[in-house]
Amino acid sequence: MDSKSAIVHVLCVTIALIEVAFCVAALADGRSVIVLKDEPPTVVDTAVLPDTSDFIEYNDADGITQTTGTRGEDYQTLAQLLGPRYGIGLLKDSSGRGWWETGDVPGLSAGMTLMELINELGVGPVAGALPLVVKGDILKHPIQFLSCTELRDTGMAAMSLGIIAVIAAGLMVIFHAAALSGLVKPKVAKVVPLLVWVVLSVGFLIVVVLAAVIYTKEWTCHNPVIPKLKPEDHFDLTYGLPFACVGFVASVVAVVAVALGVSSEGDLVSGGRVSLKVTNPATGEAV
């Protein structure tokens, strides 16, 4: 193998390792994509909140403060409903639940969405049970609980591409290392990684586009309490999207490096010169 090809294989191993580390971090961290703003705006349709006049605060016989009813203004923003610094990652949220999971309501079927709870119990009882819902983390993962189905499906598409990127980049680490060791034929060592790096480039670009759409679009959620959700208004971006941008650029660099720097001629190319073997047809000996 010529030195130019060897340098490119080392470069590609480095890029692949970085991409594996980035994707694993984004998948493992429940706050890798977005995190709640400190003071997000009201998101709940106040028409369905419990009447604040029903809220009563008093001291019992032991002097301990007790409350009855629900104070509606305490449950108007996502920060109040989900807790401060709540975040969502590529695979799961900060509570550890995936895009397709919700908390369980005691006495009811596991994993019910808000709309299913409303159909089962009615809007009033569900709104009145907000303190229990918040305290029990039943709202998490909110995208599934609020039945934001298009947003959930888009997020899971980005998640799937992240998992594929981990696998593909991991295989590139092994493949380029094998090529460096001379275990792969020169032509295969050029064609296969070129195709895989092109796929990785396209995959990272799609993730970047999906992330931008997820963050800026106003999504419909199929419930009367939070019927619309625009993540940009309530969340700040963290490191997930920048990591995807770096992955895209790095993959494009790998494509160019493999296309221009890896030789597919094997031992025929050495030190930048082409070596040819000429055989005497009469004697069969090399000359």
Image (cartoon, helix red, strand yellow):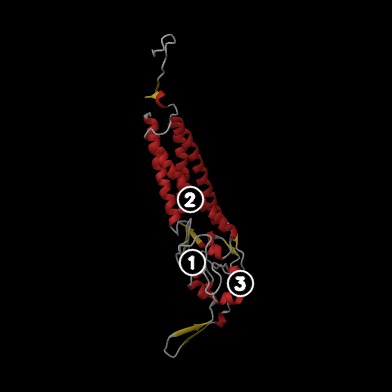
Q: Cβ–Cβ below 8 Å for labels 3 and 2?
A: no
The residue sitting at the bottom extreme is: 61
Query: Type of residue at label 1?
Result: Glu
Q: Picture coordinates of residue 68 (x, y %)? A: 52, 83
Q: Is 184 left or right of 49, judged from the image as shown?
A: left
Badge 3 marks a residue whose secondary structure is helix
Q: Secondary structure at mark 1?
A: loop
Is residue 74 something one can see in this rendering? no
Residue 74 placement (x, y as % from top left): 51, 74
How far separated are the C-alphas under marks 3 and 1?
A: 28 Å
Residue corresponding to mark 2: 163
The first of marks 1 and 2 along the sequence is 1
C-alpha distance separating marks 1 and 2: 33 Å
Q: How far from the left and from the top, in percent, is residue 235?
A: 50, 61
68 or 175: nearer the viewer: 175
Q: Is residue 283 above or below residue 150?
A: above
Q: Earlier in the sequence, mark 3 or mark 2?
A: 3
Which of the 4 image quadrants contains residue 144?
Answer: bottom right
Other-residue count near label 1 (Cα within 10 Å), few / some / many at <14 / 14–19 / ≥20? few
Q: How far apart are the two marked residues, 3 and 2, measured between alpha carbons? A: 35 Å
Q: Which residue is mark 1?
A: 39
Q: Residues within 10 Å of mark 3 (few under 14, many from 20)?
A: some
* Residue that label 3 marks: 118
Give amino acid for label 2. Ile
Q: Quadrant of the N terminus?
A: top left
Can you name the residue that lies furthest to the front here?
A: 283
Label 3 amino acid? Answer: Ile
271 sits left or right of 223 in the view: left
Q: Earlier in the sequence, mark 3 or mark 1?
A: 1
Q: Which of 199/281 is in front?
A: 281
Q: Is residue 230 visible?
A: yes
Residue at coordinates 40% horizontally, 20% vertically from top-left? 275
